Image: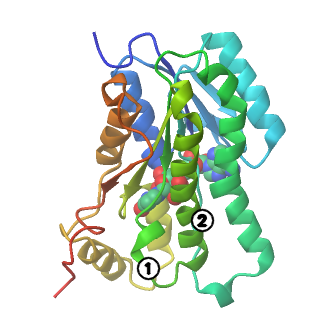
Amino acid sequence: MTAFDGLVAVVTGGSSGIGAAIVRRLRAGGARVAVFDVDPDAADAELALPVDVTDAASVEAATATVGKELGRLDVLVNNAGIGAQGTVADNPDEEWLRVLDLNVVGIARTTRAALPLLRRSPAAAIVNTCSIAATAGLPQRALYSASKGAVLALTQAMAADHVREGIRVNAVNPGTVDTPWVGRLLARADDPAAERAALEARQPHGRLVSADEVAEAVAYLASPQAASTTGTTIAVDGGMHSLRVRPA
Ligand code: NAD
C-alpha cells in the first residue's frame, strides 16, 4: 500500500515544470489527480481541467467537477504561479495587481472552493509552492518576492485557521528549479550559457534544483505520514536559505 492509495489530489499549474513533477509523484504514490491549468491539454492526469486561478468561476466549476467525477478531495497543491522581474520602479500598478492576483489571491480562491470537500477528508492537506524569493532578498525580483512572501504568511495563517478541523497547510520553498520557466528566462538572456552558469553558482550546492526533488518534498508534506506537520516550509534550495555559501 502506498501513501496516497484511495486519495484524490488537485494540482494547480500541473501541466508543466514543478506542477507536472508533483502530478507524476502523487500518481506514483497511488493518488488520482486532477490538474487545474490554463493549458490543460499538456497535463497527464485522471482529470485535466481548464482553469485560470484568477477566475473564480472557472475554479469553482472545476472543483465541482472533481467532486462529481472523483468523489472526494484530500490534497490540494496550490502551485500555479508566474514570475516578475525588476525593482519596484520597473512594474506599474497593473502588473503588481496581476501578479499578486495570480500568485496570492489565486491560492485563496482555489482553497476557498476546495474547503467543503477537504473538510470531508480524513487526511486533508494543502501544500503551497512558495519560493526562496520570499526570504532571500534577491535583486531585481521585488514584485515576485513580495508575492511569495505573502504566500509564506498565508501558509502559516491558513494552517492556524484550519488545524482544529484536521486540515494541514504547509509550503515548499524551492531555489532555482530547472523547468520550462527557467528555460524561458535563459532564452531571453544575452548569453544564455553564462546566465545559466550564474544561476547554478547562486545555489550553494552548485547546480539547479530538479522539479522531481521539489515534488518529493511536496509528496511528504501532503502525505498522511506528515500528520503532525503543519504551518511550516521545506526548503529545496541546495542550502540557499540556511547556508552562507556564496560563489567565490
Ligand atoms: P512553469 O511555467 O513551468 O509552469 C507553470 C504552470 O502554471 C504552467 O503549466 C502554466 O500553464 C500554469 N499557469 C500559469 N498561469 C496560470 C493560471 N492563471 N491558472 C492556472 N494555471 C496557470 O513554472 P514552474 O517553474 O514549474 O513554477 C511553478 C511554481 O513554482 C510557481 O508558483 C513558481 O513561482 C514556483 N517556483 C519556481 C521556481 C523555478 O525556479 N522554476 C523556483 C521557486 C518557485
Quote the CA–CA distance across marks 2 and 1. Answer: 13 Å
Residues at badges 2 and 1 in contact (C-beta under 8 Å)? no
Badge 2 amino acid:
Ser
Asked if residue 91 is positioned above or below residue 70 in the image, the reply reads: below
Q: Name the image quarter holding the N terminus.
A: top left
Q: Nearer the viewer, residue 180 or 27?
A: 27
Q: Quadrant of residue 227?
A: top left
Residue 14, can we see it? no
Q: Is residue 218 left or right of residue 248?
A: right
| Disc 1: which residue | 138
Q: How many marks?
A: 2
Mark 1 residue element: loop
Which residue does the image show at 70% across and 26% down from the upper left?
63
* Tag 1: amino acid: Leu
Q: Residues within 10 Å of mark 2 (few under 14, many from 20)?
A: many
- Quick one: label 2 or label 1, which is nearer the N terminus? 1
The verdict on label 2 being within 8 Å of ligand 1 is no
Residue at 58% across, 83% down: 86
- Vertical order, 32 against 112 (above or below): above
Q: Position of residue 93 (x, y in %)?
A: 78, 77
For the point 64% across and 46% down, which residue is it? 107
Label 1: few (<14), some (14–19) or many (≥20) C-alpha neighbours in 10 Å: few
* SS state under label 2: helix
Instruction: Give the x, y percent position of residue 149.
Output: 53, 65
The numbered disc on residue 147 is 2
Q: Say if 122 sits above or below 171 in the image.
A: above
Classify residue 110 as left or right of residue 178.
right
Residue 103 as seen in the image, left or right of residue 26: right
